[in-house]
């Protein structure tokens, strides 16, 4: 019988803090009520041309990155120049 707490939690969290995009995936801990692990796609904001994964140094130019179960990805975003000029 599956744990009844599985459907009660939010297993994917995202936070945009300045030029950093943080994606947390807490799925994959059935012993804690988080169900079986599933990956999810952390989508980059529309005005981002590139990003750098702070753990691996990998440059990201896709529209999204995969966040594995029980992991966190922190991306440093590179905002397109047009957006910077509009805010000035």
Image: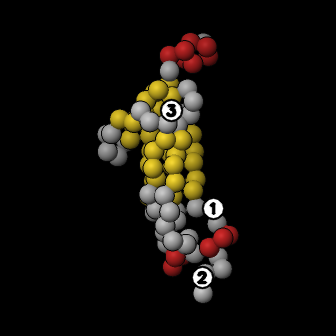
Report the quarter where the N terminus lies: bottom right
Mark 1 is surrounded, within 10 Å at the Cα level, by few (under 14), some (14 to 19) or many (20 or more) other residues, namely few
Instruction: Count neighbours of disc 3 (C-alpha within 10 A) and say few if under 14, some if 14 to 19, many if 20 or more.
Output: few
Residue 2 location in percent, x, y?
60, 82
Q: Is 75 left, or right, of 9 in this rendering?
A: left
- Residue 34 position (above or below residue 66): below
Residue at the image position 57 percent from the left and 56 percent from the top: 12
Q: Residue at x 37, y 42 (%)?
A: 54
Direction front: furthest residue: 62
Q: Nearer the viewer, residue 42 or 73?
A: 42
Tell me which numbered mark, 2 or 3, is placed earlier along the sequence: 2
Q: Which residue is mark 3?
A: 19
- Find disc 2 in the rendering and name its residue: 2
Residue at the outermost left position: 57
Query: Could you tell whether 75 is left or right of 32 in the image?
Result: left
Determine the CA span between mark 2 and mark 3.
39 Å
Q: How crowded is the residue under tag 2: few (<14 C-alpha within 10 Å), some, or many (20+)?
A: few
Q: How is the image coloured?
A: secondary structure
Q: Is 19 situated left or right of 87 in this image?
A: left
Q: Earlier in the sequence, mark 2 or mark 1?
A: 2
Query: Secondary structure under badge 3?
Result: loop
Where disc 1 sits, the SS reads loop
Instruction: Tell me where residue 14 appears, x and y as whole percent.
Output: 57, 48
Compared to residue 71, the image places residue 18 above or below, namely above
Where does label 1 land, which residue?
Answer: 10
Q: Is residue 84 above or below residue 15?
A: above
As displayed, is residue 87 above or below residue 33? above
Image coords of residue 32 (percent x, y): 54, 76
């Amino acid at each position: 019988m599956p744990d009844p707490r599985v459907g009660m939690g939010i297993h994917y969290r995202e936070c945009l803090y300045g030029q950093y995009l943080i994606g947390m995936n807490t799925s994959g801990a059935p012993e804690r009520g988080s169900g079986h692990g599933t990956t999810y796609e952390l989508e980059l904001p529309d005005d981002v041309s590139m990003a750098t994964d702070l753990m691996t140094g990998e440059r990201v130019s896709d529209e999204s990155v995969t966040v594995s179960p029980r992991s966190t990805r922190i991306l440093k975003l590179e905002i397109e120049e047009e957006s910077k000029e509009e805010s000035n």
